[in-house]
Amino acid sequence: MSERRERIVLAAVVFVVLLAQVLLYPGIDTLVVALGAGFVLDASMWFLAAEFAAFVAFAGVWGAVSDATGRRVPFIVGGALVGSGLYAVLAILPSAGNVSFGTVLLLRALQGAATIAAFSLSMTMLMDLSGGHGKNMGAAGIAIGSGTALGAPLGGQLYGVSPTLPLSVASGLFLVVALLAALVTDRAPAGDGGRLRRALGRLSETPALSIPYAFGFIDRLTAGFFALVGTLYFREAFGLSPAETGLVLALFFAPFALLQYPFGVLSDSVGRTAPIVAGSALYGLAVVGVGLAPTVELAGAGMVVVGVIGALMAPATMALVTDLVGERGRATAMAGFNAAGSLGFLAGILVGGFVAGEFGYLAAFAVAGGGEVALALVALPRLLALELPADGRPVE
């Protein structure tokens, strides 16, 4: 298989993983009730948080194992198969009798640990391809955005049939992930003979990675915020159904998907700094604007703006990770990026959920948007100090 076809297949793997994940978001409140939860906001928050806590805990583990063994595909396939099984178990729990919500959260965390293997390592395999880091990460970005853009409205429709149907569909989609991943050539560099400490040590040897990690954290914090607080806000403030909520979320994810590849190619030409700086300067303000919108139409327009700005930032940020590391440390470096992003998503869920519950939705939007601006201001000076040339590689 040519590298061009492998890029398409790997992007399809990333797409399907995100599609399965986002199916659950538009009706998360109805899902947790079906799974036995009593408090909708808190239960929704912890159900989403359990998966992303596992992402944070296991992204680095899978990356280090992959770099140490010189293999990617077996861990992607294995993670997809385990994830499929756990999604299926969650889907049948409501008919299994008295199962505590604590058990549900444990299963959700295990599913997250399996999912991050498929997600993070498939992105690493895109990094292993030649052809330009911006192009490869643009392919990953458009896959991420497309999966989330389609997952939101599709999930809303599935909830109209049954509150657990999105779980069953996600289980089937992860079988597709395993099949697609098995078709791709494993191009991982030779491993380190199991010396995980050496693989993890590469991160401390490249402190500049903290820059794309910080921006990855910022980017995903907003995604986590909209997955929980945004979803419940649109449901309550504008009286939307799960299907309608999915369409509003898609207004963010559609431009986020469609523009990532061209913006990724652009970053190969103009460098990483300009897209990241331009995006970070406006991103948090656009998030606050959505919360201030008095009508669903204006809120939807704000979601489009957030999606466009996010698409400008995301592929350049991911490509910067590739620029900063050598071949042998890629899985560990990308795992660190995904862990930072997952931590951001988790923060968006927990902080957004807490503030919304205690002080209301407007305060939650202000905290999320203000946090974006503050973190960007802290990280921008270090990004500018890298003095990246047009090809994205830092000057030594």
Image (spheres, rainbow, N blue to C red):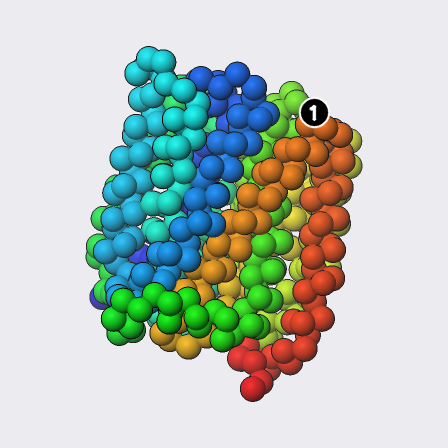
**For mark 1, what is the residue?**
237
Percent from the top left, x then y, of residue 375?
69, 57
User: Measured along the vertical axis of the image, is residue 180 above or below residue 20?
Assistant: below
Percent from the top left, x then y, of residue 87?
33, 33
Q: Residue furthest top?
A: 97
Q: Residue at x 40, y 42 (%)?
A: 112
In the image, what residue type sits under mark 1?
A: Ala
Q: Which residue is drawn at 45% across and 66% down?
A: 333
Dot 1: few (<14), some (14–19), or many (≥20) neighbours within 10 Å? few
Q: Image quadrant of residue 95?
A: top left
From the viewer's perspective, is 135 left or right of 182? right
Q: Is mark 1 on a helix, strand or loop?
A: helix
Percent from the top left, x then y, of residue 102?
43, 26
* Between 122 and 52, the one nearer to me in the picture: 52
* Quadrant the C terminus occupies: bottom right
Percent from the top left, x then y, of residue 151?
45, 38
